[in-house]
Image (cartoon, rainbow, N blue to C red):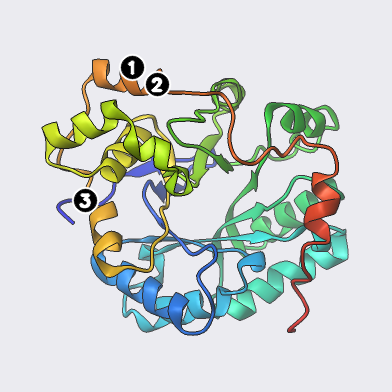
Amino acid sequence: MTEEAPKFKLNDGNEIPSFGFGVFQIPADGSTYKAVSQALKDGYRHIDTAVAYFNEQEVGKAVRDSGIPRNQIWITSKMWLQDYAYEDANKSIDRTLKKLGLDYIDLYLIHQPYGKVDEAWQAMIEAQKAGKIRSIGVSNMTPKIWQKWADKGIFNKKMPAVNQVEFNPYFQQKELRQIMSQNHVTLEAWAPLGEGNHSLFAEPLLNNLAKKYGKDVGQIILRFEHQEGIIVFPKSIHEARIKSNLNIFDFELTSDEMDAIRNLDQGHGAHNPDAPGTGEMLLNAFDVHAND
């Protein structure tokens, strides 16, 4: 790591590290603990987990064992949609705190925008006031879904600090970003590297830029996203990749290069939250309390 990741200021005044480490699909068999410990050692100060990743405990243990002051590490988790009813939401927040073994969560998100989102949001607002959560936000909200909840008035009491959505050079969320900018909501990218999309990594433009700057294609993509003001947290369990992903702060893409990458946008991603039945499918995907 040549330089510490800069921070972005959220609409609630909190400052979030712009570059983090994601743990989606890393098993809780010691692998998450090992990967997060390595990431913290390499200089990451932002870890993104979720109730539905089933690895909050290992994330929390790695943070506690790191020796790094708690206030220097940003921890994000997310509530699963089976817990959105108000009382269940309150319990979910306390359960996450217990699993992490921490006094507060830096950012807590509504993971999937279906069902009793209004009740979950109310519980999160109250938990924020109580000091259990520093910032609150949403995830997977498309322009259509955002408008639906905005029309119901749930953001009148509190505007989300972030919206975490699929984002990469092939899916740049242009319409959504216009809505977000009006409300000073910061976008976070899941799958910032297109989940290893071979076509994306074969793009001649990105490969030429990689050669020019002495970087790999992944670093060019992450640098582009950083310059776009997007918070990213690529996931890896490989030590070399964990280190190299962070090495994007010693160069800057030109405005022409940024425009060229913007032109790669295809306007859609791998996941469509607007597809009929998505909420029901996700709700039935698994039970986050099966092992409680």
Q: Secondary structure at mark 1?
A: helix
| Residue indicated by mark 3 | 247
Q: Quick check: marks 3 and 1 in contact, CB under 8 Å? A: no
Q: Residue sitting at 33 percent across and 17 percent down? A: 259
Locate the N terminus and report the quarter of the image it occupies. bottom left
Residue type of the residue flagged with mark 2? Arg
Whether residue 119 is visible to the viewer of this picture, yes or no, is no
Locate the C terminus and report the quarter of the image it occupies. bottom right
Q: Quadrant of residue 73?
A: bottom left
Q: Quick check: marks 1 and 2 in contact, CB under 8 Å? A: yes
| Residue indicated by mark 2 | 262
Residue 5 at x, y percent in the picture: 28, 49
Please state which of residues 248 and 186 is positioned toward the viewer in this rendering: 248
Q: Residue sitting at 46 percent across and 84 percent down? A: 30
Please state which of residues 200 and 61 is positioned toward the viewer in this rendering: 200
- Which of discs 2 and 3 lies nearer the camera? The answer is 2
| Residue indicated by mark 1 | 259
Q: Secondary structure at mark 2?
A: helix
